[in-house]
Amino acid sequence: MKISKRRFSIALAAAALVAAGGAAQAQTALDDIMKSKEIKIAIPTDFPPYGFVGTDLKPQGLDIEMANYIAGKLGVKVELLSVTSANRIPYLQTRKADLVISTLGKNPDREKVIDFTAAYSPFFIAVFGPKTLAVKSPADMAGKSISVTRGSVDDMELTKVAPPTTELRRFEDNNSTVSAFVAGQTQLVATSAQVAGNMMAKNPQLGTEYKFVLKDSPNFIGVGKGEDKLRLKVNEILADAKKNGDIDKMAMKWLGRPAGDLPN
């Protein structure tokens, strides 16, 4: 019994040392970035208008601009790493990336494995339509036709606010919803900023613009678990960008609307 207790005590001591070492290591990201003069940021390249490959074959979009902005404020070079929804969090966990700026929403499950900065941009569902059509609020949809994907969050939020005389035309998937609007079968479309951004990029002749929000879900920057020094530094940069209007400018440029009030 004494031997077992002694072994148990040794095991606990070893575990404590490992934990202490992990905690020390976990706080090195910002120092490593400043020492190497380079930051590695994971970004999307298949999710316009947040991140996509331009005609010059270079990544562009709101998330890419934010990545470059943060690197610039830190005074370091940036290495952009293209990620998918599935591997963006593992990139942080394996230290392949220092930050993830990839339309990342915050939820309890994710908070168990990574940390988050303050929000840097909105991700929203909205009503979109041509600039020639005066629509600024749900009431303005009265008597107008609008396409939406059946059973989606878009559909649920739109149904809550649409006047009784609005013609809701429901389709089975996003492609059909967008196609109906592009073909002129409906005057408006209700969809996510991502789907609308892709649609507007492919059909500039339509003169489509953002009209009003149906639901907001802000994006946060992912940081390695325990990397408080880096997280707080990025939060400082974001706070300044909110105050001086840079975050609103980015949102206007890529999303067609100001970022507005974003959670810290």
Image (cartoon, rainbow, N blue to C red):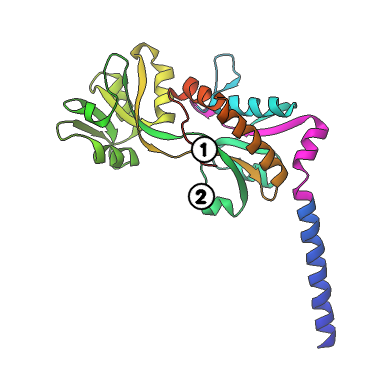
Residue that label 1 marks: 219
Q: Secondary structure at mark 1?
A: strand
Res 1 label: none
On the picture, is 47 further left or further right than 177?
Answer: right
Residue 163 location, x and y as percent? 19, 34
The answer to which image quadrant residue 52 occupies is top right
Can you say which quadrant of the picture contains the N terminus? Answer: bottom right
In which quadrant is the C terminus drawn?
Answer: top right
Residue that extends furthest to the top in the rendered view of this protein: 205
Give the class, few, some or many, for how many residues have Cα within 10 Å of label 1's Cα (few <14, many ≥20): many
The residue singled out by tag 2 in the image is 107
Q: Is residue 46 inside the magenta stretch?
A: yes
Percent x, y of residue 240: 61, 30
Give the residues in magenta.
Answer: 25-49
Q: Position of residue 188 (x, y in %)?
A: 27, 24
Secondary structure under tag 2 reads: loop
Say left or right for 145 vs 87: left
Q: Earlier in the sequence, mark 1 or mark 2?
A: 2
Identify residue type, mark 1: Asn
Q: Is residue 239 left or right of residue 262?
A: right
**Residue 82 seen in the figure:** no
Q: Is residue 142 above or below residue 23?
A: above
> Does the stretch in magenta take in 20?
no
